Image: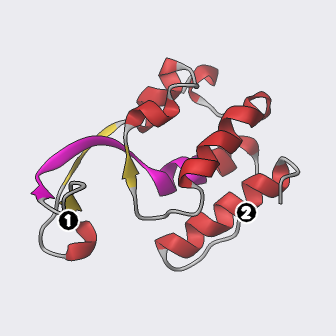
């Protein structure tokens, strides 16, 4: 992985703006354009085709009208938050549940940047 694909402390403003949009969300998938303020290599690191798994409502993807969709090109909020922590050397702890883990990451990142 290149250094262009890592979050850096100098990206404080962009990271905090991103957290304002997704911080604490451990379940959501978002439009990759949310990472447009970051280098292309970093955007590519997180952009995936995420497929809907209709065997459970937790893994089924829905559009804004509540219709099931087969797949979407998106970023996964929890992965992004966990990687920000990892890239910046921030310890957020380990929690059961995606929501608790995402909230811990968001809180630790904000604290790291003096915004707790």
Query: Which quadrant: the C terminus?
Result: bottom right
Residue tagged 2: 107
Compare residues 28 and 2 and report the one nearer the observer: 28
Instruction: Report the label total.
Output: 2
Q: Is residue 8 visible?
A: no
How far, Cα to Cα, is label 2 from label 1? 28 Å
Q: Do the residues labelled 2 and 1 touch (CB within 8 Å)?
A: no
Instruction: Decide: is 107 above or below 81.
Output: below
Residue tagged 1: 60
Compare residues 32 and 48 and report the one nearer the observer: 32
Quadrant in which residue 104 is drawn: bottom right
Instruction: Give the percent coordinates (x, y) of residue 28.
Output: 40, 58
Taking the spot 22% from the left edge, 44% from the top edge, the residue there is: 72
Residue with the most extreme right position: 114
Left or right: residue 98 versus residue 102 is left
Instruction: Give the percent coordinates (x, y) of residue 65.
Output: 19, 58
Taking the spot 62% from the left edge, 68% from the top edge, the residue there is: 103
Residue 78: within the magenta? yes
The boundaries of the magenta stretch are 68-83
- Residue 43 got which mark? none
Compare residues 1 and 96 and report the one nearer the observer: 96
Left or right: residue 3 versus residue 62 is right
Left or right: residue 116 versus residue 43 is right
Comes first in the chain, label 2 or label 1? 1
Taking the spot 20% from the left edge, 59% from the top edge, the residue there is: 62
Compare residues 76 and 116 and report the one nearer the observer: 116
Q: How is the rendered protein coloured?
A: secondary structure
Taking the spot 41% from the left edge, 64% from the top edge, the residue there is: 27
Residue 80: within the magenta? yes
Q: Can residue 78 be seen in this view?
A: yes
Instruction: Give the percent coordinates (x, y) of residue 84.
Output: 64, 45
């Amino acid at each position: 992985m290149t250094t262009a694909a890592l979050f850096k402390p100098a990206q404080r403003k962009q990271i905090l703006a991103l957290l304002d949009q997704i911080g604490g969300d451990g379940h959501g998938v978002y439009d990759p354009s949310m990472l447009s303020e970051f280098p292309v290599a970093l955007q590519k690191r997180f952009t995936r085709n995420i497929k809907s798994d209709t065997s459970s409502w937790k893994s089924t993807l829905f559009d804004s009208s509540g219709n099931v969709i087969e797949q979407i090109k998106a970023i996964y909020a929890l992965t992004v938050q966990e990687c920000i922590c990892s890239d910046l050397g921030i310890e957020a702890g380990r929690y059961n549940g995606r929501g608790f883990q995402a909230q811990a990451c968001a809180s630790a990142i904000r604290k790291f940047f003096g915004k707790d």
